[in-house]
Image (cartoon, rainbow, N blue to C red):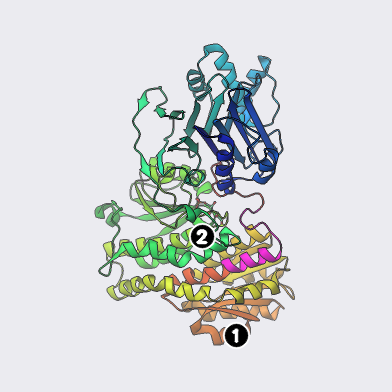
Amino acid sequence: MCGIIGFAGREQAAPILLDGLERMEYRGYDSAGIAVRSATKGLQVKKTKGRLQVLRDLTQDGAELEGTLGIGHTRWATHGEPNDINAHPHVSENGRIALVHNGIIENYLEIKEQLQRHGVTFTSDTDSEVVAQLLEFHYNECHNMLEAVGRVLRRIQGSYAFGIICSDYPNALIAARKDSPLILGFGENGNFIASDVTAIIKHTRDVVYMDDGEIAVVTAENIDVFDSEMNPLEKKHSQVDWDVSAAEKGGYAHFMFKEIMEQPEAIRKTVSPRVREGRVVLDDLRLPAEYVRDISRIFIIACGSSYHVGMVSKYNWERLLRRPVEVCLASEFRYSDPLVDEKSLVVVISQSGETLDTMAAMREAKRLGARTLAIVNVVGSSIAREADDVLYTWAGPEIAVATTKAYSTQLVLMDLVGLYLADLLGTVEKSEYDAILWELQTLPEKLEQVLTHVEDIQYFASRYFNHNSIFFIGRNLDYAMGLEGSLKLKEISYIHSEAYASGELKHGTISLIEPGTLVVALGPYAALFDKSMSNVVEVKARGAEVLAVTTERFREKMEKTADSTVVVPDTHPILQPSLGVVPLQLFAYYVALQRGCDIDKPRNLAKSVTVE
Ligand code: F6R
């Protein structure tokens, strides 16, 4: 949700800022801007509505802005429509201070009114401009930028990552964070701030993760970090170990397609290091065995696709652990006065590790005494650092807004954790444990087989892309998988779509089925295949066109009823969603392609949702 970047160095800042913003465009892409401080021209600001390319054109790829100190922003609008004026950076009234912001200032209206009473005039509708103006107000009082930032931070409420430059300080930018991600990068030709490692990985792997309440002063030579009382801090450096090419398209037309194709390897990386001598080994998990034995209830909390992983895991964990598992939408959980206590295990799932709803829910669970375990992809992210335990999915950077490989690796990691806990609790038979673990290790090869049938899915997409409304139906794990298939389709192709538990159709939704309605029938879940088939027959009888996904084992039966059938290999029933979801991802991808949609950057969305 918005990406910010800053550079203080010995090279021209503008091209570096534009390149970094391009790599972070997935965080928001309705407008963008940069501000650069030049020795001769002072502060120069260029900002515009639209994609980064528009800003590139406006600044001749940065050549128009001279200077080695600057900040940049790519926006996902919250306060004020996406237009040139609401785009960041925001500049204070006297033109001396420029600021970029990711987050939301909750008390901005109150501050705005106070400043207006002092005669300050505002140009934009944003909460962020209020901070720029408040900074000027305090700077005029104390004539010290760091002091002015401190005063502002004490005044504002909400979430923020700020990058700030001031024309009186030709060599330094100031950064601050609370509840929005911000990292510091130490490069050879200068130093950086950024919302995400992807923005600066080309220049440095040496990073520091800022914590809430911290302020940093960044110059070409140095970065000094302070706590909220302005005491200097010694921060731990981390080395980013992934390859630069991991965040590039590498010849693929879209990041989403590249990431779909990377799934076998991603799953391999998640699973292999965690299986030794036929056992699940979770070296990073410090969860005490006594705590596990005492768990009365498990909560899985997440948003969007990560929540769908939770839906699959509910079925699997209840089967393996024989403990009640509740799956909660993070945005609902935190305000629901949840019945969580010190005998609860709360598992939060988040690719980005920055989703504000998930983080707030996790904090609420901790406050109520539960132990928290985070399943996260982005190393060093806020959720990863705040959870009692963290297990990383190791999917590598995921750039497309619609998640694919992160979802798949979350799924297998949850399976591994489920097996591990079931073993501790003694609730799984050895033969079952061995069978699941064996199949988990063979998933990558089976996935590779699924991916050899890409053209079939492309063909089905070309047949069905004109439908206005598509239903996904299935029972149990197939239903949970359908939720993800349906979300993938709607978010990137903008087709209305719903996922239903097949048995629920007759309680209302079947009235929407009319001749020609496309129903994607999911039937890999063996235990309920026959029941699911009756529901397929019911929708067929009402004229639906049925595209089915099933396994080799049920191919023949399914082909007799469905209009088109996609077949995936058989595996252990609890792992079947890992194979079944891939044709659904591909189907969404090709449908969106046929409809001419912007696949990697769907409208109104952003990858990292750091607002409520
Ligand atoms: C959909 C998608 C979103 C995210 C959701 C949670 O393709 O990516 O639904 O799953 O915004 O994000 P994380 O997992 O980063 O907490």
Residue 452 in percent (x, y) is at 53, 76
How far from the left and from the top, in percent, is residue 118? 65, 14
Label annotation for residue 225? none
- Residue 351: image location, x then y, percent: 47, 52
What amino acid is labelled 1 in the image? Glu
In front here: 419 or 584?
A: 584
The answer to whether residue 106 of the structure is visible from this angle is no
Q: In this orientation, does residue 585 appear?
A: yes
Q: Residue 593 placed where, x, y %?
A: 67, 64
Q: In the picture provided, is 142 more to the left or to the right than 591?
A: left
Q: Is residue 507 above or below residue 229?
A: below
Q: Quadrant of the C terminus?
A: top right
User: Does label 2 or label 1 sit earlier along the sequence?
Assistant: 2
- 6 relative to 439 in the view: left or right: right
Crowd rating for badge 2 (residues with CA inside 10 Å; few <14, some 14–19, many 20+) = many
Please indicate whether residue 135 sits to the left or right of residue 327 in the image: right
Residue of label 2 = 308
Q: How many marks?
A: 2
Of 78 and 89, the residue lying toward us: 89
The secondary element bearing badge 2 is classed as: helix
Please state the extent of the stretch shown in magenta in the rendering. 585-602
Q: Inspect the magenta stretch and tell me whether residue 588 lies in it.
A: yes
* Residue in the picture at 69% in, 31% down: 125
Q: Nearer the viewer, residue 3 or 302?
A: 3
SS for callout 1: helix
Quarter of the picture containing the N terminus is top right
Residue under circle 1? 559
